[in-house]
Every structure is written in C-alpha cells, then in structure tokens.
Amino acid sequence: MNSETLNTLDSYSKNKYKYGFVTEIDEEKPKKGLNEDIIKFISSKKNEPDWMLEWRLKAFSKWKKMKEPKWANLNFPEIDYQDIYYYSAPKGFDKKPKDLSEVDPKLIETYNKLGIPLEEQKVLAGVAVDVVFDSVSVATTYKGELEKLGIIFCSIGEAIQKHPDLIKKYLGSVIPAGDHSFSALNSAVFTDGSFVYIPEGIKCPMELSTYFRINAENTGQFERTLIIADKGSYVSYLEGCTAPKRDDNQLHAANVELIALEDAEIKYSTVQNWYPGDEDGKGGIYNFVTKRGLCAGKNSKISWTQVETGSAITWKYPSCILKGDNSIGEFYSVAITNNFQQADTGTKMTHIGKNTKSKIISKGISLGKSQNTYRGEVSFLRKAEKARNYTQCDSLLVGNQCGAHTVPYIDSKNNTAVIEHEASTSKINEDQLYYCRQRGLSHEEAVSLIVNGFCKQVLQELPMEFAVEAQKLVSISLEGSVG
Amino acid sequence: MNIQDNYLKNSNNIFFSQNKEVQNHREKLIYNFENDSFDRKNNESLKNVNPKNFIDFKYKYLIPEETSVINNNHENSYSIVSVNGQCSSFKDDKIEISKILVEDYNDFTKNDTIDKNDHFVNLNSLFLNSGFKIVIKKNNNIKIKISNIITDDDLTTFQKNNYICEEGSSLNLIEEYENKNNSTSNILNVIKLEKNSHLNHFLIQDNSPNHSLIVTSHSSCKKNSTYNQKVYNFSEGYVRNFHYSELVETNSEVDLQGVFFLKDNNTSNNKTFVKHLAEDCKSNQVYKGILNDRAKATYFSNTHVDQVAQKTEGYQLSKGILLSDNATYFSKPELKIYADDVKCSHGSTIGPIDENAIFYLRSRGMSKIAATKILISSFINEELSSIDNEQMSEIIQKKLVRYLSKVK
C-alpha cells in the first residue's frame, strides 16, 4: 500500500457512512412494537402454516418472562423493544439505485480496495437484485448444479413451505426458543435466513454463500439460519462479506443452528463488517447473535471461523455441542475493535461424547477507546472420556485507552479429559516495529503488517478468496487509529 | 433460623451493635440478604455454595475464658494463640497487638475488599464477634506464628484482623488452622503494607471434616513493598480461600500461591484477585490442586490492570489433577486489561496424571500406586520446596504423606 492509498482510505474512513440509507416509509410496514398481533402479521405475510405460528407465539410468551443476559462486559443503553419495527417489506425497485453510477463512489472505492468483483459490488450496494441476477450466469448455474446433487439451499421461509418435516424436526433443536432472551426474541419474530440440507454422502462442491441465494434480497435483522449435514456429507458456508454493510436496523438478533450427523462436516465462516458507529461512538449496530452447532453423530465435525470488525456491540458466542463420540469442534476468531466499539465474543465447547476434541484460537485486537473481551467456556461432562481441548487466546492492545479482557470458564468433570488453556496480552512488539520501519515501511503500514501476522493463524482457516479480502479488511480496520 | 433473628437475638456479643452508624449499615445488609434472589451465575462467591446454608444457620459464640497467650520465644519471634478469634493485648518496641476497640468501628465493619458482592465478607461485617489488630513498627524484622483455636462445637466465629506493616518492616507470618470440632470460622484479614515493607504469609489449613473455614484477605501494597502468600490446604472440611490484593503504588509486588489436596466429598472454593493501580508492579497467581473421590474445587483468578498501570507484569497459572471419575474442577482465569504496555498471561490445565510418566516409572519396576504418589509429589514439589523454614517444611511433608496414604 502506498501512502497515497492510505490517505484516500483515511479520508474515506472519516467520511464513512455519510450517505446512510434513509428509512423508507412503506405501506407494507406495520406499526412499531412487539406484541402477538405483530407475530401473527409476520406469520401471515409469510404464508406460514399454523404450527409455525404456534411455535412463534410460544417463543414470544417465553420471551415476555425473560431478562437479557447480563454477564457480558458491555455497556449500552437499554433496548426499547417496543420502539423497533419487526417486519420490513423488501424495498421497492424504484427506490433502489439503478446501477453502480448512482452508488456512493467512496463505497465503490472500498469495494475495489477489497477486490470485490463488479457483479458482487452491485449486490452489496443494493442495486436492484433481480436485475443483477439475470446477468449473473454463475449464480444460476450454481443453483442448477446444487439441485442435481439433491442439496436444498433456499430461504428459511421457503423451507417452511416446502420441507416442513425437516423444519419441524430440527428448528429449535440446537437453540431452544427459551434458551435466553435473544433466542426467544428471534424465534418469535424471525423473518428471513437460509436453510441448507446436504443429503447423505454428498460433498457440496462449492462454498455456499448468501450471494447465490436468489431470494435473499433482504436478509433482515432477525435472521434465522439452519444447516443440516446428513451422514457423511460436507458443506462449507460463508456468511456476510468483507465489504462494509450499510443497514438501517440497529438491533440484530440472529440465530444460527448447525446439525452434523454421523461423519458429516460443516465449516461455517463469517466476516462481519457492519456499521460500527462514528468516531464518537454514536450510532452503530447492536449485534446479538446466537450460533450453536450440534455434532450429533459419531466422527462429525463443526468448525467456526469468524472475523469481526464491525458493529458497535458484538455479542456472539458460536459454540459446539460435541455429543457424538470422536466428534470435533473448532473455533477460530479474529475480533478487531476500534473507536468506541465493544465486543464480547468467544465460544462454548461442551464435551459430552467420548474422545471428543476441540480447539479454540482467538485473537483480539483493541484500538482507540474500544473494549474487546474473549469469553469462552469449555466443559467436560462426566462421560466425556479422553476428551481433549486446547485453547489459545491472545490479545493485542494499541493505544492506552482501550481494554482487552479474557474470561475463560473451564469445567472438568472427567478425570481422563485434558484441558490446556493459555492466554497472553501485550502491545505490539517494539523490535518488530523497528525492524519494519528500518526497511522503509511507514508506522501505519508496519502496524498493519504485524497485526496481519498476529491474525494469520485464523485468517488461513478462511476459504481462499475470502482470506485475501479479510487480510485487506484487517488493514483497513486499523486505519486512522495508529500513530 | 433466619438472618434477622440471628442478629437481633445475639447482638449482645456482636461488636459495635450499639453504634448507630453501624446499625444502619447492617440493616441494609440484612435487607439485601433477605431480598436478594441470589444470582448464582454472576456471583463468584456463590459458586458451589448453597445460599441457604449461610442464611439459615445457628449463631453461637462464646467469649473465651482464658485469654490467649503471647510468647516472646526468642528475640524477634512471637507466637500467638488466638482462642475463638480473640487474643490479648501486647506491646513492645517492635510490635503492638490490640483488641478491637469501640472507636475502631469504621476499620472493622466496612467491606474494604474489591468484591462488594462477596456474601461471606458481608456476613462477616454483619456478625463480627472477634478479631484483633497487629502493628509491626518501623524498620523491624520479626516472625509471628498464630495458632487459631476454636474451643467448642457449633461455634460460629466472625473474625476480622487488621495487619499493618509500617515503613521498612519485614514480617514472616505463619498461621495455623487445625480444628477438630464442628464449627464455622469466617475470617477476614485486612493487610496494609507501607513503603518498603515485606510480608511472607503462610496459611496452613488442616481441619476435620465438619469444620468449615472461610478465609478472605485483602492486602494493599504501597511503594516497593512485597506481599507473598502461600496457602496449604489439607483440610477435610470445607475451605474457602478468597484473596484480594491491590497494588496501589509503584514497584510493589504480590505473589498469591496455593495448593489444595481434596478427597471424599470435600469442596474447596478459591479465588485470587490482583488489581494493578500503579506502574511497574508485578503479580503472580499460582494455584495447584489434587482432587480425589468426589471432591469439588473452583478457582477464580483475576488480574485487573488499570489504565495508568503501564509496565505491568501479571501472570496466572492454574493446574488441577483429577484422580477419580467423580472429582470436578472448575477454573476461570480472567484478565482485564486497560493499559497497553503490559505483559500478562494465564495458563490453565486440568487433566489426569500423565500416563506416559506412569508407564515410565512402572517399566522401571514401580507399582502403579507408588508411581502415582511420586508423580503427585513432584507436581507440587515446587510449592513445597520453596519453604525456607525447616520446621514448617517438615509439618507440611507429614501432611502430604498422610494425604498420599489414602490415594489408591
């Protein structure tokens, strides 16, 4: 990166989100507030069967009795659940930019920096999707190929209509509606999300991603994703994108459930880059996500990889329940917080079966006035014989006004299980910095290089093209705060 | 009996119960105890503890008839016998030991520990019925041994001791808790280390199965002072060791270490908390535990580094060995860091004895039990070999042998 690029980026980062979308007033949009009527409204809008409505209402009645979990190291004003729209219809085509020339040029610039292909840029910038997809032959080809293999990949709304058996069997089986208040809220009002079913013995030939899902026009603030990998199958799923995502919804409470049956493997990668609020900490998205995977069968494997750079508040603990014998859970995470961002993220590995293994690698980087917390729980239940866990969480602090915290919970009830946990916190090594500077890199470039090296262990777990973008994203996230 | 009845019926032998200010403070505490719904998830002092046990207990306290003895064995060496948490006054040019005085109410009733929600500390300030104050005078180097004795069954002692090490003083403090009766002791030590002072604090805990011991300490270290604490827990009854430490001025150091040996149905809760509030300070927290049968243990360790505390070094280590299928160990090593120029780390392991090591020893002709015992001894050898007092080292070795004899 030359200094000119840095300057451009710097000015970009200061002007970020200046042209945020204006909330539209649409006739389809019901009133603000959460009550049974709104849930009935959502359910009827989606033409849902009665059992689904019942399921939602049950979740809502549970939510009413619940309080928000308060153990996280986060500070935010109380959420007024009655001041939120719970259903927003897709935006009309006439309100959308017709092509990229109407999109904020600064945004396009970042897309180019990240190396995002032109067609994808259109999707990201919100150019009327259907028009785009007509010309994107890749997406339609992919869809045909998936159908041939018997892979179901559609929106959750469509799955409720077309595959009620699978939904009835698996929805809420990993994250029960009454698990905590955000999961109950999501269960009551979820509007969209993905559904994936991989049949027995099928290895999904490509990375599934929301880009290829034609119906996924508006993923919505209460997203619900359900992925089922049947015996011996394999799937890699990508969520989110490295490009900055503009969104008018302040509260996000998504639920993601993964189920891996015998010998199946699911790889779930996320890059989250939502609006983090401005330099003074105003605005920004509150992201309260519940992600949980169940290794139900023997020899199954679930692997989570996440890169978290956006959102004013990140509350996210992708976890694995290792129920089947010999099952494996993995968690790789990079969380970068800048300005006034707060992140409380980590994982939960529950070892139930014999010979289960889990591995946690977490890298936290705090800059500016942000707070970054790793919170993880590893527990070995009584029957988890010869189970094994390795945890490593490292934090890097840049500047003396930020905070880095590590809060692991380790619980062992089995005497043959082995747990190892290590963590360290430090600032950027002066010697490394000096070495880079000596070779002609600017301070900012040097820091970016070192931080990228610090995250490498995690970034290399991402699918190839994602990894390249993610590396650039890490550099961009550090802009304007170093030096 | 509920907490309010307990208090009202026994206020005659609880300290400062006539003081208006203290009364108000205690009323608030009672109110909290009765109305708090006891959030067990978010309160570390309640992990593995049933709140009912400390809300519904039977209060009983006897003021000791015999006043305790203070011997000046050799020069610079004192031995104190504290009976039911009390000891008599003593004064010479090096040391001053005094009972709790009415005007000291402020020092003895407020919760000066870092965790204001620690229920056992609040219980201590509510029912305070014993304790003393020891001042080590400037530039003196002395040794003290305290034997804590409880005279009767079913006693509930709530004891608070204040230690003050004046400038340049150095103290070697050994505390012994060996009781065979069914009583409960709730002890809070508040330790103040002035400039250039040093304190080596050893706690040897070896109680019978029905004796519950709750030890909490709060130390604060000023410039260039050091506080080293070593806890040896061989008790067969419940023991809680919660030790808080604050490094308030530069270049101070704190080292909190502990080992515990549990068996049968025994439970032990442990916590260390170090708060770095000044630059250039060091801290170390190491706990090691061996759990057999159905034993349960928890260990919370915390390093909190304030924004101003640059150049901090803070280390934590927690190791646990589970010898049986039914033993459980919970550990939560926490780091909270608000300064950037720091070196902080923690490590935590829980597991069985290394099978390869057992195999190595067995292939050299050792029986499995003998091999296990050797490996347990070596696991905690570091903690035991660092004792420079020969007599104490011998006592601890004996206790270890006793524990190992029960290992099968």
Image (tube, grey):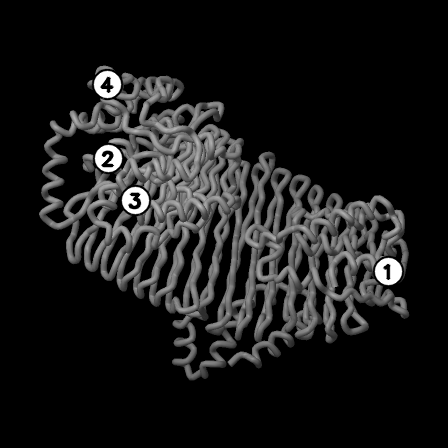
The residue at the point 62 percent across, 44 percent down is: B275
Viewer-nearest of discs 4 and 1? 4
Q: Which residue is mark 3?
A: A225
Q: CA distance from mark 4 to mark 2?
A: 18 Å
Decide if residue A430 is in sight here.
Answer: no
| Discs 4 and 2 lie in a common subunit | yes
Viewer-nearest of discs 1 and 3? 3
Q: CA distance from mark 1 to mark 3?
A: 63 Å
Q: Chain of mark 2?
A: A
Residue A94: assigned label: 4
A371 over B242 or under it: above or below = above
Decide if residue A42 is in sight here.
Answer: yes
> Tag 3's secondary structure?
strand
| Observer-nearest of B1 and A369 | B1
Q: Earlier in the sequence, mark 2 or mark 3?
A: 2
| Discs 1 and 2 lie in a common subunit | no
Q: Chain of mark 1?
A: B
Q: Which residue is mark 2?
A: A216
Q: CA distance from mark 2 to mark 3?
A: 12 Å
- Is disc 3 in contact with disc 4, using a CB cutoff of under 8 Å? no
Residue B263, image x, y percentages: 57, 74
Q: CA distance from mark 1 to mark 2?
A: 73 Å
**How would you rate the neighbour count of disc 3 (Cα within 10 Å): few for under 14, some for 14-19, many for 20 or more?**
many
| Discs 2 and 3 lie in a common subunit | yes
The residue at the point 37 percent across, 21 percent down is: A16
